[in-house]
Structures are given as structure tokens and as C-alpha cells.
Image (cartoon, coloured by chain):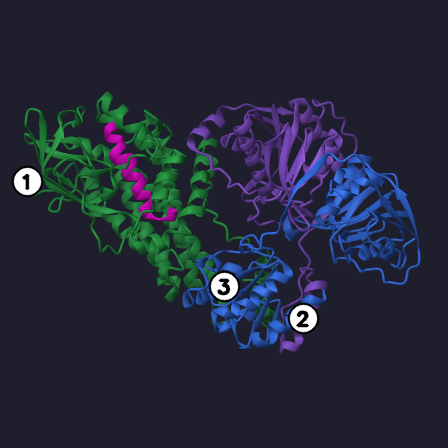
Amino acid sequence: MDVTVIADSTDDGLTPVTAQLVGAATSIGGNPTVLCPGGVGASEAASISGVSKVISVEGDCFGTYEGGAWATALDSQATGDLVLAAASPRGRDIAASLAALRKIPIIQDATGLEVGLVVSRPIYSGKAMETSNVEGPCVITLRANAFDAAPDGGTSEVSTVNQSADVGLAVKEAIAKASERLDVTEADIIISGGRGMGEPSNFSHLNEVADMIGAAVGASRAAVDTWEEIPHSMQVGQTGKTVTPSLYIAVGISGAIQHLAGMKTSKYIVAINKDPDAPIFGVADYGIVATWEDALPALKTELAKL
Amino acid sequence: MRRGLLNASRVKRGGASWQRSFALRGRDRSDMAYEALDFYDIDALLTEEEKMVRDMVRDWVDKEVIPNIEDACRDGIFPDKWRVDLGEMGILGAPLKGYGCPGLSYIAYGLICQELERGDSGVRSFASVQGSLAMYPIWDFGSEEQKNHYLPRMASGELIGCFGLTEPDYGSNPGDMITRAEDKGDYYLLNGAKMWITNGTIADLAVVWAKLDGVIRGFIVEKDDPGFSAPEMTGKHSLKASVTSELVFQDCMIPKDRILPGVKGLKGPFSCLNNARYGISWGAVGAAQSCFNSTKEYALSRIQFGHPIASFQLIQNKLSWMLREITKAQLLAYHLGKKKDDGTWIPEHISLAKMNNVDIALEIARMSRDIHGANGILDEYPIMRHMANLESVKTYEGTHDIHNLILGRHITGIQSFTREP
Amino acid sequence: MAIGVLLKQVPDTTAKIGVSGGRVDESAVSKWSMSPYDEYALESALKLKESGGGDVVAITCGPARAGKMLTDAAAVGADTLMHVQIDSHDSIDSTQIQSILAAALERAGCNVVFCGKQAADTNGGSTGPGVAMLMGASCVSHVSEVSADAGGYLALRASSGGDERVHVSAPCVFAFDKGSEELRRPNVRGIMMAKKKVIETVSPEDLGVSMGESRVTVVSHSPPPEKPPGQKFEGADSVATVVSKLRDEANVI
């Protein structure tokens, strides 16, 4: 079965998801052709094991991002009944445009793929799973890290195709990302500190971690009440914000019932506390008994490796 | 509760089966959002419009009142933004029709009160006083000029009103009020004092009841009228986010066109109070719902003796009692609202609902405090605030006991307010 | 000018989701709401109308319950309401829903369309780009602001390095992220007017869409997979283990 994989890339090259798309394709017996929009990451893609061929699709349209235009340019090179793309913002956008162009269905954000074609994905923000059967050609986007990546070691050939499409929009102004940090109620990852941080200035360590993973920084009421440098807007808990991020990292927070009330519905909770009996460990999926002075540098090192 | 280290290790030790099911249920605990207790599905009886108004106010309370109420109480202020928002939502003077007023049903007015008081009794008090006690008498007893002059701007929240009936020495017995008005030909001269006046200091106008030639009449006093002042009363342990004032009239001169032409005697203030008391019967339900929700949540997450306290029979008994009383109170308020809407009500119906619903709300607040243990006294939870507020609500707008006497008179035909026959 | 807004009614993001008999139990959903990104799309459409005139046409495709959401949209200012009634979203695939919405937009004469970047139930994100493709329109995704500009529109969208302002002409679709404008609250006057507003209820057939068979069949819904029990590790050396578990087991970083 021929499978078209649309490479997921940033300006710097492929993201790790591309190898996962290839891995998913081969796991169901597919023969993947990787399309690299704008030619980004073509040689990297060729070195992924199991890739049948790589097509570097180059054209003027790839100078400005417009999902519909990119999909139109990629369309002529897409072969087979299955197109896979990453469930990244651009991946979803291009995939949806391509599916509409080809008049075939799309399923976004799959976390499971089986021969048949049986596709599973989380719905309602992960409160339930859905399993569907797809007949005929389709486009599927896959969630990052949900599939095993194909290993390195491929030696497929790279061909280059010139194919462009009309772009309907023009970039007038680029605005650098504002440095202001997300509010805890908007963030998908939160790292919070409590009075165990010792000094308000030590929250800078939490900020550093937060910047690495796009997290918001929160605080317990104890921290907010003790240090005026920590504003009430950061407070998570009964009288602060109620949050339900995918990941909540509690550092130096003992876990008073009022704090737990504000964060216990987080999907995953990591607790870092030097007291092995701290109640926060009672709700943690992963507890680390350590001082923040030891744990945060290690955390930064590990996150940098991702 | 969510499955974590604590539970997992307990289950491994062969813990009781409830722990397992409890943990499973805990997977999808999205109950952080407010979900109103509605055991008998009163919702199904509401019109689409009533539900939309209710939801609008509910969202506003969640976004504006609950995050800010503790600060407002600590500072002892009614934030001006709330006045602006209430006006923008268009809910002031809810059941009044015409003159820029909303013209909603009494059920909708009740639902508004319920949601506001779920936030805080002080917010509901503001709306009650503005709508039922200040706008209503102008709407019902005012001249055409008075209605056109005041009501649109009061409905929009631009002008704040208050209501002066109670005096330092005359509370349950307003008929013996001391405040006097004299007809001076070109103007009226007011002398006397009113006390316990919600919104007094921040009000642009006061509807004041005073005796003119021995007959109780209503007057509209504006804040800049000579001889009028409204000093704030401080030191309250209750309704801290509500402004309470004295109204002082020292040779206060008001123009002749400020008397309410349409009513004489106690019927005037009492008809205002009927509407406000009706709103309170719903408001109390909101406060009770807030206490119940906090208590249920707390009891499910508080672990003692290795189990959530919600799993203990004494706690369940209390929660069950709360559910029972709130459900009854909701049915009372709803049915009374229907009677208000179709005009088949009598004042005694309102007395019963006000008295009962505030009574059970206060009892629920006290019981909630009990279940919250020491945590119940913290401002982390709304409990103690509701409890302290409800002590005022039990007393104002006709005390609990006065309402008993109103019902006693209704049952027996014998008034027992005074010793005179 | 007709400004189209595509809205979807979803279980409120705070509502519990229960599964019974292999299907999400919709009857147990305590509160249905307008999908949050759609609210920003609606707000921006209303702003555009206020600055340059036009009619905001709110369109939804969904079961009967979704009509209420259109009334909510009218309460904050939507002028025209169109409800394409279907039995359930489970029984139609993306090509069908996009055909329906494109046909509805054509009927309403909209060549500027606002929608959320994804709906809070499936979190897909296919509708905006898909409908744009069917309309022959440009789709600008991850938009937080739109204003009229020199015969077209200026949109602020997220890009890899920050934000960028792009110019686009009609026909175009704006798929909204969280917008930069605060959402307006309804008021009593709006609610009273919304109550009187007629919802044009049509079937896909009325729009000339022949539905055919869905090529995607939902086999089952299930509760999310059990998480492993809580695990506790000693010492900072365990951080590496925890990070790899967060990446591979929990899939959250």
C-alpha cells in the first residue's frame, strides 16, 4: 500500500514527528513516500529507515504560509490511498485542505492506527477515546509521540519537483513573540512553586523551566501570601485559579487541600518535594522526593535534550 | 479525589472496593465548574428566555463577583464596576415594564436574585434595593414626569437609588416613624433620620417615607438636596461588600414635585417590600446552593481516618438534609414566582417563602461550616461569608419572627404585633 | 455584505463526559455551549460588522439541540440564523459536513467566513481549511484579530516566530484562535430580541447537498485508557526517568 507522508518541519528542518509518521506508515504495511514542502528536510527524510522515496516539492508558494496553497502544490505528488501528516498546527491545516481538495475524509489527531483502516483518537480533550473505521482513501494526522519513530539508516532517493500554487494572502508585518508569559488558566503546562522555594527570587528557576516548555508559572497561596513579589494572579487553588492543564508540575508545594482543589483535575501531575510524606504526592502521577535545588537543574538538563 | 500515590498504595494493600470505584470516578472530575443543584429539574419549567437571563447572570457572577468578592469584603466596598455591569446587562428593575425597564417575568427576576446571591448577598441586596425598593415605588406611585425622569437612568445603572423606611428606633414597627415632612407652600421640609439603608451613601436618590400631616407619604430626595446627608455605617460583620448608611434630614428642602402622588399610608412601603422579599426567597436559594456545592466538594476531597469524610454517615445525613431543604425552597420560590406572574399571590405567600428560605439557607451555611471543619472559617471558602450575610438577610425586609406573626394573623385572624386590640 | 460565522455546539469544556454502551452519553452532558474558539470568531465578526456594516449570519450544522446556541449568538448580535439539521455528528464524515457548510454559506451569500480553529469536542481543525477549499477561498488559520483593509482584510495570525499580519481578499475564511478582543456579554435587550429571531432550519437536501454514505464509521467510544498508578522516585537522579515517562507514557511534553 502506497502511503504519502507530509513531512513536518520548522525552518530549521524536520521535527521528530516525521520519523513517527514513517514509523506509523510502515507499521500497517505501508510503503511511504515523504513529501517535503518547500524542500525543507529532504535529505534528513531520506535517511529515515523504511522510506521508499522522498519528493522535495519546491515552488514559490512555499515562501508564504497558506495551508490551502501548500496542499494544492503537494496534491499532484501525493499517491496512494492514505496520506499521513502531523497533528501540528500547520500539519492539520495542510492535511484538511488536501482532504477537501481530494474530496476524501480526514481524521485529525490520531493516537492509534491499525490495518483496516481503524483509527483511534482522543476526543473531548481526552475525556473519551473514539475508534473509527475508514473506507477508501483518507487523510489522517497523527499526534506527536504517540507512534514509534522509524529508526535512522534509510537511503532512499530524493527527487525534486517544481510545483507551486496561487497564494491568496500576503504577509504585511512580522511581529516578534511577546515575552509575556501565559496566564495559568490558558496554559497547557504549568509549573508552580510553593513556600518550599525558600525565596521569591528562586521563582526565576521556575521561569527558566517554563520558558523551555512553553509553560505558565503558578504559585500556592502560601507563596502568594508570604511574598508580595508573587502576585495573586499566579495563585492556583481554592481562592486562586482552577486549572486543568495536561501537565502540572508542583515544586516545593506541600499540597494543602485548598491547593489540590485548584489543580487536581490536571491530566498529569508531577510533584517535586523534599518531604516524602507531603500530601501532594497523594495526587501525583510522578513524584520526585528531592530538593528543588537538586531537581530543577536536572529537569532543565533533561528538557534541553528533548 | 484523583487516583494518585495515596490511593494506589491503599488499593494495593487490598483496600475496600469503594476506593477503586471512587478513583475511577475521579478520572473525569470536571466538577470545578459551577453546576447548580437542581434535584427536581426546575430548569425544565423555565422558558428559554428565563434560562438565558439566568445563564447570563450566572456567567457574570462566576467571572466578576466570585474572583473579587473577598477583596470587596475586606475593603468594605461595593465595586462600582458591578453597578456598571448590572446596568449593562439590563437586569435592574427586572419585572418592571416600560420607561427603559427590562419587563421580565417574576420568575426571571427570581432567577437573577438567585444567581446574584450565589455570589454574595451584598450584590443581590444592591439589585433588590435598586429595583424593588427604589425603582418600583417610582414606577407604581410616581407621576409620569417622575417616571420618565428617573426610571430609564436607574434601569441603566446610571443613577443609584436607596429606600428610607427603617429608623433608629423603629424597625419592625415602621408605622410609628418619627421622620416628618412639612408643606411649606413652595417646598417640603423634611426632618428626621433613617438607618440601615443599603446603598445610602452611594445613592443618587432616596425614596424616603415620612409623615405629612400624620399620613405616611413617599418623597424622592436627591443627594445634593440641602439638609440631606448619608453617612456610611461601618463595623459590620455581615454584608461587608454592601454599603449601609444612615440618611439624615435636617431641614431638608425638597421641591414640591418630588412627592409620590400615587400612594398614602404603609401600603406604599409594604408593596415595595413585597417585591424585595420575593427576590430574597430566591436569593437565599442561591446562597444555599453555593454552600452546598462547596460542602459536597470539600467532603469528597477531605480525607480523615483514611476515607473521604463524604463516605461517613453523619456527613451524608447532613448533605441529604441540605438537598432536601434546598429542593423544597426551590419549589416554594418557583411556585410563588408563578403566582406573582399570574397575580394570584397574597403578601402572606411571600412571608412564608422569605422566612423559610432564608432560615434554611442560614442553617445550611452553619452546617456547611461544620462540615468544612476549621477550614470553614477561612475566606478560601464562601461559607462563613454567606453565613454572616444571611444573619442580616434573616433580619432585614421583615424579620423571621415578624413573618411568623404575619402568618399567625393570617391563620387566626388575630393580630399579635401590638397589645392594643 | 453577509459575514458568515460557523458555530458548533459542544459539551461545555467543564462538563463531564460519560461513556455508556460504547458511546459518549450525550443525554448526560450537563451543559452545552458554543465551542470556545467559535466565540472569538463570532466576536470578531461582530466587530467587523460594527466597523464596516453588513449582516452577521450565524450558521451551525448539528442536531436539534444546537438551535439554542444560535439564539445565544443572536443575543450578542448575530443578525441571521441558519441551522442545518442533522441527526448526529457521528454519522457524517468531514467531506459531508464541509459540503453542507459550504452550501449554507453560498445560500447565505457569504464570502467572508469566520470560524474557530477547532471545535472543543473533537479538537480536529478541519472545517475552516476544508470549507475554504470548497469555496475556492483563502484560509487564514490561528487568527486572533481581523479588520477591514484596502478592499480586503488584515488578519493577525500566529506564526512560528511570533505573530504576523497578513492581507487577504474575499473570498476568505478566518479560523480563530483565542482572539485578542474580550468577548461581549449578552444583555436583556439582546435576549429579548434573540427570542423573536427566526432560525432558518434546513436539511442538507434543502441546500442541494446529496449526502451519500459516510466513509467514516464510529465503531466505539471508550473511557480514556487507565493511567498507571502514581509512582514515587527518590532523588534528583530520577528526573531523567520522569521526563522520559512524561514524553513516552503520558505524552504531555
Q: Magenta span has B133?
A: yes
The letter of the blue chain is: A
The letter of the green chain is: B
Q: Quadrant of residue C105?
A: top right
Could you tell me the amino acid type at mark 2? Thr
Residue C161 higher or lower than A305, as above or below: above
Foreground label between 3 and 1? 3
Q: Residues within 10 Å of mark 3 (few under 14, many from 20)?
A: many
Foreground label between 3 and 2? 2
Q: Is residue B60 visible?
A: yes
Q: Is residue A74 left or right of residue C14?
A: right
Q: Which residue is mark 1?
A: B420
Q: Is residue C97 visible?
A: no
Q: Is residue A7 left or right of residue B294?
A: right
Q: Residues within 10 Å of mark 1 (few under 14, many from 20)?
A: few
Do the dots labelled 3 and 2 sit on one chain? yes
Give the spatial CA distance, label 3 vs label 2. Answer: 23 Å
Tell me the residue at 41%/53% (across/down): B292
The letter of the purple chain is: C
**First along the sequence among labels 3 and 2:** 3
Quadrant location, the C terminus of chain B: top left
Highlighted range, magenta: B118-138
Give the spatial CA distance, label 2 vs label 1. Answer: 88 Å
Could you tell me the amino acid type at mark 3? Ala
Q: What SS does tag 1 mark?
A: loop
Tell me the subunit letter for badge 1.
B
